[in-house]
Amino acid sequence: MSARPAGAEVAYGPLLAALAALTLGAALVSLAVGYARLDLFAALADAFAGRPTVAAVVLEQIRLPRAALGATVGFSLGLAGAALQGLLRNPLADPGVIGVSGGAAFGAVVVFYSGLAGLIALAMPLGGVAGAVLAALALYALAGRGAGTMTLILAGVTINAFAGALTALALNLSPNPYAAYEIMFWLMGSLADRSLPQLWLALPLSLVGWALLLASAPALDALSLGEDTAASLGFDLGRLRARLVAGVALCVGAAVAVTGAISFVGLVAPHLLRPLVGHRPGRLLLVSGFGGAIVLLVADIVVRLIPLHPELRLGVATALIGAPLLYGLIDRMWGEA
């Protein structure tokens, strides 16, 4: 095994600092962009001074929740995508591609359909987490350890199709056509019309998921050398898989429960940033989290700048961008096989 290039450890800190700065910059731009003009500095001054001006209300009730949720959900999806790719040792693993987002969406739809969402504040996020857990377990059962590209894709297609069929069944059986219409638009994924209480619902579950995944970084580096090597280094692979599945389910389930299904962020962010960390899966985790936040915030800014009314749904926009990228990745991998 060749030695890693000297200075790689030093470059990791500046890379994280640059990505964190870009995330903050994208969030500030998100605060400033919208259908109505907003003097951001005046709005910030009014908000901090407690003056209930129109600018301060727009900032606090509309722009701030959208930007904060964009950063939180993007971080969760980017981190979850990198963790799944490290666990399955496959660069095509993504919560949306392999069915985890679809399972989370179905879990949230069941809670919404049953009326529990109006009775229990945490019902939607917990329903999303439960659906994501089931989908992740089904993926691991179908694809197995060290699954090849074709096996992973087929397993993801199977899970996505089944979750989609169950979701369609719930919509079909909905006694209220307006509720079905609302669910359908929610499933397309969006950060619009979200509020701070929704952020406070998703954030605690997301933080636990982030901690579980980031704590797995050393084990993922060892796992990239093979399961036998990882076990010989003292890592409990069963515990590692359980921690990763739980972390991905918490991140994706909480994200989908508040924003709907937003796909391909967990595929795009690790793919773009992997070369910058020497293809080390452990290092890629935090880097991909920031990358996912940047990708989602920028996509949401672009969506708002497109002169369409009603606004293009964010999940539709990311799918239009991510699907061709996925095709290109598959084509390149098969060409190299």
Image: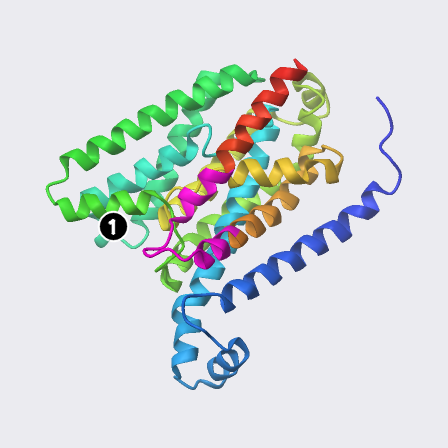
In the rendered image, the residue lying farthest to the top is 337
> Foreground residue, 276 or 250?
276
Residue that appears at 50% across and 53% down: 72
Q: Is residue 54 part of the magenta span, yes or no?
A: no
Q: Is residue 91 left or right of residue 264?
A: right
Q: Amino acid at mark 1?
A: Ala
In the rendered image, the residue lying farthest to the right is 6
In the rendered image, the residue lying farthest to the front is 307
Q: Quadrant of residue 275?
A: top right
Q: Is residue 307 part of the magenta span, yes or no?
A: yes
Task: State the image coordinates of residue 51 (x, y, percent, origin top left).
Answer: 42, 86
Q: Which residue is mark 1?
A: 117
Q: Is residue 222 above or below residue 14?
A: above
In the rendered image, the residue lying farthest to the left is 175
Q: Is residue 160 left or right of residue 23?
A: left
Which color scheme does this rendered protein use? rainbow
Asked whether the viewer can see residue 92, the reply is: no
Task: State the image coordinates of residue 153 (x, y, percent, origin top left).
Answer: 48, 20
Residue that appears at 36% across and 46% down: 257
Q: Is residue 274 above or below residue 32?
A: above
Q: Is residue 51 left or right of residue 226?
A: left
Residue that appears at 56% across and 48% down: 295
**Which region is colored magenta?**
299-321
Task: State the image coordinates of residue 24 (x, y, percent, origin top left).
Answer: 61, 61
